[in-house]
Amino acid sequence: MDNVNIKKLAQALHLSTSTVSRAFRDNSDISATTKERILAMAKQLNYQPNHYASNLREQKSKTIAVIVPELANNYFSLAIQGIERVASAKGYHILIYATNDQFEKEVSFIKHLHNGRADGIIMSVSGEANDHNYLNELSKKRLPLVFFDRVYEDIITPRVITNDYESSFSATKHLIQQGCKRIAYLAVNKTLSIGKTRMQGYIDALKKFKIPFQEELIIDCTNNYKENIDLLKEAFTTLKPDGVFTSVERLAFATYYACYDINLSIPKDLKVIGFSSLEIAPLLNPALSTVTQPASDLGKTAAELLFKMLENPNDINPASEVVLNSKLFQRESTSKG
């Protein structure tokens, strides 16, 4: 039988289409015998139920949208894995959108998702604009939103973050204890909540250990890999820091390349530590000291929070915040040797 649809399947079984439909939805008001007969005939005729169309009729897409700044970052890949495991267990799929840190893309994705393509959104924000009011449209349309990692402070919605201030303070403290007195802080976006929090941890650690804060040692980097390497080569040559704290993962790689190009030895000439979830960090030469966020758990917790909002919206405080702890791993890139 060609182009089998649910109507033709029902005719072949001498049943109503509603009975066949209930079998595929696993309704309890249909006998096990009838269900088995329907599924056997469907297999015989190679019929695949259109769950998407069924979900549309029920006004459920059974899909979660995940919006992240980038996909190349191992941290976000791990977070997405954590989200996907929870979604899959709930019978949901995920749609992944990468903004490449472009605010216009973020706004476009959100507007696109208003058409019912997703039942909820888990997002790590781009932060390239001050007006985030477009996100308030989500609440009007009853589309749940959970922030993770990067958040907008002026939008009230549940969020899952890590202890960035304490982690940044500890990383800077570690460099100081290893003998560093001119510590450069590499930043990408100081206006973003996560950027401000991490930089404050760095500044406060310097103050705590009576090391003068120097504005010139805050090095603004970009999202372009080659530009960062060139920028850092110049900065390391002119500023001559003895320690570097990279606020995001990709800047650690740029630091290694820059040092190689200008013959700076890590850790002899420059000690390096950074936020990173790279599994290969211990295999780098030298092994990279890291502040490692529990990326997979962060994604898992954000997804669990979103499903609680979907299932029992009145039980979730819109201002709820979950904080997970990162861990500092001391390796060769910050050794005294």
Image (tube, rainbow, N blue to C red):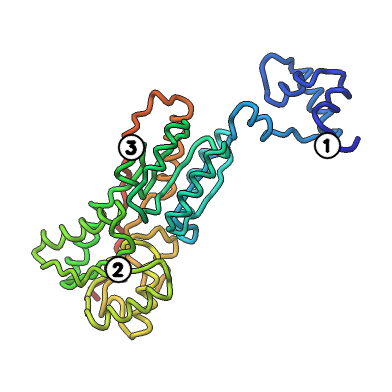
**Residue behind mark 1:** 46
Describe residue 102's horizontal placement relative to residue 26 as left or right: left
Label 2 CA crowd tier, 10 Å (few <14, some 14–19, many 20+) = some
Residue 57: in sight, yes or no?
yes
Q: Which mark is residue 156?
A: 3
- Secondary structure under tag 3 reads loop
Q: Which image quadrant is residue 276 in?
A: bottom left
Which quarter shows the C terminus?
bottom left
Q: Are marks 2 and 3 in contact (CB under 8 Å)?
A: no
For label 2, the residue is: 220
Which mark lies nearer to you, 1 or 3? 3
Question: In which quadrant is the N terminus drawn?
Answer: top right
What residue sits 25% from the left and 80% below the top? 269
- Spatial distance from mark 1 to mark 3, Cα to Cα? 48 Å
Q: CA distance from mark 1 to mark 2?
A: 58 Å
The circle on residue 154 is none
Q: Is residue 82 above or below residue 221?
A: above
Between 150 and 177, the one nearer to me in the picture = 150
Counting residues from the start of the chain, the first of labels 1 and 2 encountered is: 1
Q: Position of residue 321 (x, y in %)?
A: 32, 38
Measuring from the top left, give residue 214's x and y in whole percent: 15, 69
Tell me the quarter of the picture where residue 159 sits.
top left
Q: In the shown orientation, is residue 325 left or right of residue 8? A: left
Question: x%, y% of residue 313?
Answer: 43, 26
- Work out whether residue 334 can be spotted: no
Amino acid type of the residue tagged 2 in the rendering: Asp
**Residue sitting farthest toward the left:** 210
